[in-house]
């Protein structure tokens, strides 16, 4: 499995799943991490990846769900929706391999686990693989499917809100997207729990989740010097 859209300002977060087994043949020619492929190359790989794999699917969690649950729980929801699609085809993975070092798919077994919505399927055992999208063909396949499906969704949504340039930036923090946010404000498809640019904040900085913004570190003031006024 692999995710796309985690760092976007608008649109869903999407998780692709690609299932292989001992009978799976040679991987499709040119398959690699979706971020290393051009858009036409990714699109051309989608059908070969689907034919190559035993089963595949993409799940999504919308911006409203990201705002309500937080990005990690939204990733989990999108991932389990992808697994539920496989389950509907009678396909139950024995193990899931995730790109990176963080298992965001397994539901937390702690006091706050109940904050997650009811997940549609039980999650198989999870293993993580550092740089898995580069080293593991099946993760690369999942990344291609997720990227292509989410990009297509953002191109369609751009027709509803043409000022934000989603057909090109896919909801990420490109300069034109940030400028439109400062001028027009967010839409219902933006992640409103994130620190989005506003007219009062014209600096072209990428928005990040509020929880990820560290507290400012106090700067020592030399003895006898006047401290700067807040906002100065």
Image (spheres, rainbow, N blue to C red):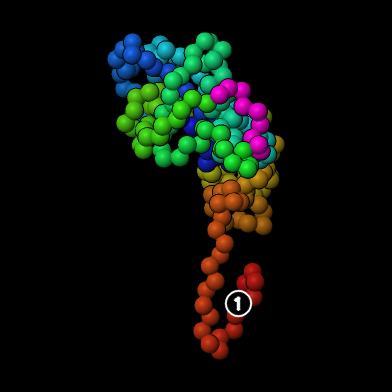
Residue pictured at 40% horizontal, 14% vertical: 53
**Horizontal side, residue 53 vs residue 73: left or right:** left
Q: Is residue 94 magenta?
A: no
**What are the residue bounds of the magenta stretch?**
114-122
Give the percent coordinates (x, y) of residue 212. 55, 51
Q: Is residue 119 magenta?
A: yes
Residue at the spot of label 1:
228
Give the percent coordinates (x, y) of residue 71. 58, 40
Using the rendered view, name the quadrant where residue 19 is placed.
top left
Q: Residue furthest bottom?
A: 224
**Is residue 87 or residue 166 the one in the foreground?**
87
**Is residue 24 or residue 146 the one in the foreground?**
24
Residue pictured at 57% horizontal, 28% vertical: 78
Main secondary structure found in the magenta portion: loop
Residue pictured at 36% horizontal, 38% vertical: 130
**Is residue 7 or residue 153 the one in the foreground?**
7
Q: From the image, which quarter does the C terminus lie in?
A: bottom right
Give the percent coordinates (x, y) of residue 52. 38, 13
Give the percent coordinates (x, y) of residue 191. 64, 41
Residue pictured at 49% horizontal, 32% vertical: 3
């Amino acid at each position: 499995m692999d995710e796309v859209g985690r760092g976007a300002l608008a649109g869903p977060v999407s998780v692709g799943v690609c299932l292989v087994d001992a009978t799976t043949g040679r991987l499709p020619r040119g398959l690699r991490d979706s971020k290393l492929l051009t858009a036409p190359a990714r699109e051309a790989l989608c059908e070969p990846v689907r034919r190559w794999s035993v089963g595949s699917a993409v799940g999504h969690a919308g911006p409203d769900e990201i705002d309500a649950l937080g990005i990690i729980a939204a990733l989990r929801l999108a991932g389990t929706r992808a697994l539920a699609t496989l389950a509907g085809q009678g396909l139950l993975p024995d193990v899931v391999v995730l790109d990176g070092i963080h298992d965001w798919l397994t539901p937390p077994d702690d006091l706050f686990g109940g904050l997650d919505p009811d997940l549609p399927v039980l999650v198989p055992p999870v293993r993580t693989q550092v740089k898995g999208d580069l080293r593991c063909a099946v993760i690369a396949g999942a990344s291609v499917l997720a990227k292509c499906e989410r990009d297509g969704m953002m191109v369609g949504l751009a027709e509803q809100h043409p000022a934000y340039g989603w057909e090109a930036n896919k909801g990420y923090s490109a300069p034109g997207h940030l400028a439109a946010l400062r001028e027009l404000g967010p839409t219902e498809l933006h992640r409103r729990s994130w620190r989005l640019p506003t007219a009062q904040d014209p600096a072209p900085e990428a928005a990040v989740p509020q929880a990820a913004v560290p507290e400012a570190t106090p700067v020592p003031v030399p003895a006898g010097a006047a401290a700067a006024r807040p906002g100065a």
